[in-house]
Image: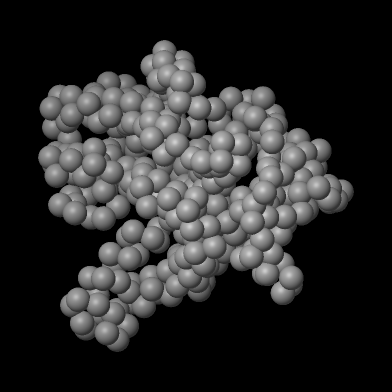
Amino acid sequence: MLNKLKTLFSSPITSVPELLNKLYYPQLDGLRGIAILVVIGSHIILYTSSEKFINGNIGVEIFFVLSGFLITTLLLKEKLLNNKVSFRNFYIRRGLRILPVAYLFLIILIFLNCCFNLNISFGSLFASALYIKNLHINYVGNWYNAHFWTLSIEEQFYIIFPFLLIYCLNNYIKIICILVLSIPILQFVGYNNLGLFYSNYIIHKITFLLINLFGNGTTAILIGSLLSILMFKDVLPTKTKKNYYFLSFIIFIIAITFRMTFTDLINSNYLTSTIFSIAIAVVIFLFLTNENDFLSILLKNPILVKVGVLSYSLYIWQQLFTHQQPWRNSFKYSDSPLFNIPVLFVVAYISYHFYELKFLKLKEKYK
């Protein structure tokens, strides 16, 4: 154990692990497919007696862990291959992937806001456009762009952490460990109004600023990022393939069950979120090192993979189709999932193939 810790903090990254040299991992798209289906399912049954059976946070946290793992892997590979990282190209690539469909959604949302009197405030739209929705600045609660809090967390991660990753790797690892351990504690004392964290105004505000910046998703991204680093440093050996056929699947099911049931039992959404994210990182490591295990086979299902490819498009547009549809009560079946969910998938397909792909092709210039 001590040798592993010494390797983590002292050994340099000198090569790309063979396991991470592939250009594409269909299992990761399959996992995205599961994540977005969980999010959509949870929103369909929101505020009904069935909502306790699906927790949308499960899907969101899977997305966060995947994002941290993939972004870190790409940046470390670029540094090893080119001896440097072009942050200009990195931000152009991220912008071309994230911004076009997000801003198209906001433009259409403004139009729908006028047509259906959705009462979405300018402040709320402005916070979404600037990707500060998670900070609750000029926050007015509404449903239609509420999901921009997750996009805000992603964007803030891209702004703050890649520089630390590339230029101060050991400090970056320490920061990950500190945040993963401390943020759940801060969230517990903050939301339970304990001591100075409630009575002292300045400490209270600083506590919630840290929670909003580095909690509620950032820790999950950092856990995914740490997984990649552990693989690059061979702390988690990628060459030894062990035949644990059902292990990743069993951990995956246990993690979901734990996240669904223990949050209320121990009264800490943030602690269960952190434990769940760590479990998902373990699952990703296991099915990547054994591509023929049971979970890998499930995740490589062509339908799940195709849903995973559309997952970002589906996530952006699903807010209009799953709950409080702007056109609800306008015509027969206007608020029925049997009508709205097929339309959602059609809209996401059109959005991806006839709009987003144009920008994704531009990304190739900045590889």
Q: Is residue 91 left or right of residue 283?
A: left
Q: Does the image show residue 324? A: yes
Picture colour scheme: one colour
In x, y percent, where is residue 250?
A: 73, 54
Q: Nearer the viewer, residue 33 or 71?
A: 71
Residue 356 locus on image (x, y percent): 41, 21
Question: In front here: 120 or 85?
Answer: 85
Residue visible at 66% across and 61% down in the picture: 11
Residue 10 x %, y %: 64, 65
Residue positioned most to the top: 354
Q: Does 96 sit above or below residue 59?
A: above
- Image quadrant in which you'd find residue 343: top left
* Quadrant position of residue 70: top right
Q: Number of callouts in the render? A: 0
Percent x, y of residue 314: 44, 30
Residue 350 shows in this picture: no
Judging depth in this view, the residue of 39 and 353 nearest the camera is 353
The relative height of residue 219 versus residue 353 in the rendered view (above or below) is: below
- Left/right placement of residue 210 relative to residue 89 reads left
Q: Residue at left 76%, top 45%?
A: 289
Looking at this view, name the residue that lies furthest to the front: 83
Q: Going 56% across and 31% down the picture, which residue do you hit?
A: 308
Q: Quadrant of the N terminus?
A: bottom right
Q: Which residue shows up at 49% across the image and 64% down it?
A: 171
Vertical position of residue 101 compared to residue 65: above or below = above
Relative to 16, residue 6 above or below: below
Residue that sits furthest to the right in the current view: 243
Answer with left or right where residue 45 lies relative to residue 323. Answer: right
